[in-house]
């Protein structure tokens, strides 16, 4: 099948284990740098994610490497989630080494992602409607064009926001009756479940399995001492799961902390809890040597989060888009002219 390949010598193969991690990190970071995408990945982060497989994501099934004459030049990944708007979303993404762009490799990986996800959906039928889903940053013009040409539609928009300075931090007090307590491995699961419950009325979807929790806790950059979680008696009322991505900061030459998840459970909303926990989070991040902070937010968030973040000094820094496409039949998803491949 070499004649059908968009690039002579191109081969798609499954993830081969730990030896692939450095190449995946290299490819993703080269693409992010070329596109002005403000995040970076590293081997230890990938290893943590890949070492806890489950039904939603299993690297041996859901990661594809594109190589030319044995040299890795691109990567694709897939997963699925049940969304809050009642869909089984078959998600996929990928990255191509900028030196190998404009040769059809991204198109080949997109076709492969669609084919494999369609096969997965066919092998696991459900009454829940299925769609294909993907994600792009607004500076990723090639990916935006690729998805648009493939029939995907933009369905939701998101902002990365930053507080460029941790000087002159806001001061706030917790609502009466609530207290912040340290989080341990034993109490982390309760925080995890409370966060999942709080986001049930937000758009999107999340792998809420125990395996994903273990994956999260195993990440070397998960630091429970950074979490700010408020309790009402034994109940988790809300929290901010903070994170410092040391390797990313080093790569970008910054000192930024992330408010990776900000949540308040319904009975404790509209009482200033999120404001107080964010204020304390910013102070904690500053005490750890950070000079700026970042977070992500749904542009259409119905709880007023965007306005809250702006009042606390955050500014929109980067915009991203969620895309969807109806799931095609297995015959239509593969397309013609796929390059040669090795399959598990």
Image (cartoon, rainbow, N blue to C red):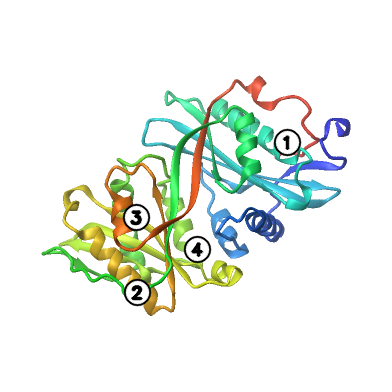
Per the rendering, the mark at residue 166 is none
**Front label number (4 vs 2):** 2
Q: Seen in the image, is 24 located left or right of residue 121?
A: right
Looking at the image, do the residues carrying marks 1 and 4 touch, with CB atoms under 8 Å apart?
A: no
- Could you tell me which residue is drawn at 33 percent across and 64 percent down? 186
Residue 184 picture location, percent across and down: 33, 68
Considering depth in this image, is 12 or 104 the residue closer to the camera? Answer: 104
Residue 200 picture location, percent across and down: 31, 42
What residue did someone put label 1 on?
Answer: 108
Q: Seen in the image, is 94 located left or right of residue 337?
A: left
Instruction: Work out which quarter of the rendered image holds the N terminus and state it.
Output: top right
- Could you tell me which residue is drawn at 45 percent across and 42 percent down? 157
Task: Kindly indicate the quadrant of the structure image that contains residue 93.
Answer: top right
What residue did someone put label 4 on?
Answer: 219
For marks 3 and 2, the one nearer the N-term is 3
Residue at mark 4 to residue at mark 2: CA–CA distance:
20 Å
Task: Kindly indicate the quadrant of the structure image that contains residue 341.
Answer: top right
What residue did someone put label 3 on?
Answer: 192
Residue at mark 1 to residue at mark 2: CA–CA distance:
45 Å
> Is 290 located above or below residue 105 in the figure?
below
Q: How many residues crowd around disc 1 within 10 Å: few (fewer than 14), some, or many (20 or more)?
A: many
Secondary element at image label 1: helix
Task: Kindly indicate the quadrant of the structure image that contains residue 282.
Answer: bottom left
**Front label number (1 vs 4):** 1
Q: How many residues crowd around disc 4 within 10 Å: few (fewer than 14), some, or many (20 or more)?
A: some
For marks 3 and 1, the one nearer the N-term is 1
Per the rendering, the mark at residue 284 is 2
Q: Is residue 283 visible?
A: yes
Q: Is residue 183 visible?
A: no
């Amino acid at each position: 099948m070499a004649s059908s390949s968009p690039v002579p010598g191109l081969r798609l193969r499954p993830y081969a284990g730990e030896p692939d991690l450095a190449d995946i990190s290299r490819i993703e970071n080269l693409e992010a740098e070329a596109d002005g995408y403000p995040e970076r990945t590293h081997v230890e982060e990938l290893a943590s994610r890949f070492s806890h497989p489950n039904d939603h994501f299993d690297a041996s099934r859901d990661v594809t490497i594109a190589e030319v004459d044995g040299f890795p030049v691109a990567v694709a990944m897939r997963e699925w989630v049940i969304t809050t708007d009642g869909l089984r979303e078959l998600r996929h993404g990928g990255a191509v080494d900028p030196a190998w762009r404009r040769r059809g490799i991204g198109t080949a990986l997109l076709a492969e992602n669609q084919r494999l996800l369609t096969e997965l959906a066919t092998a696991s039928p459900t009454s829940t409607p299925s769609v294909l889903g993907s994600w792009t940053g607004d500076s990723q013009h090639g990916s935006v064009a690729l998805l648009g040409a493939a029939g995907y539609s933009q369905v939701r928009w998101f902002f990365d926001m930053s507080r460029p300075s941790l000087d002159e931090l806001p001061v706030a007090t917790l609502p009466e009756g609530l207290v912040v307590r340290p989080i341990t491995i034993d109490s982390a699961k309760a925080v995890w479940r409370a966060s999942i419950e709080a986001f049930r009325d937000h758009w999107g979807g999340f792998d809420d399995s125990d395996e994903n929790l273990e994956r999260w806790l195993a990440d070397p950059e998960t630091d429970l001492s950074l979490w700010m979680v408020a309790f009402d008696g034994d109940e988790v009322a809300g929290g901010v799961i903070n994170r410092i991505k040391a390797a990313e900061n080093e790569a970008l030459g910054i000192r930024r902390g992330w408010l990776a998840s900000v949540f308040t459970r319904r009975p404790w909303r509209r009482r200033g809890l999120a404001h107080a926990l964010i204020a304390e989070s910013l102070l904690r991040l500053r005490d750890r040597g950070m000079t700026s902070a970042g977070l992500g937010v749904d542009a259409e968030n119905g709880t007023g989060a965007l306005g809250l973040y702006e009042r606390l000094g955050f500014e929109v820094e980067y915009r991203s888009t969620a895309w969807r496409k109806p799931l095609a039949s297995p015959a239509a998803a593969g397309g013609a002219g796929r390059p040669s491949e090795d399959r598990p």
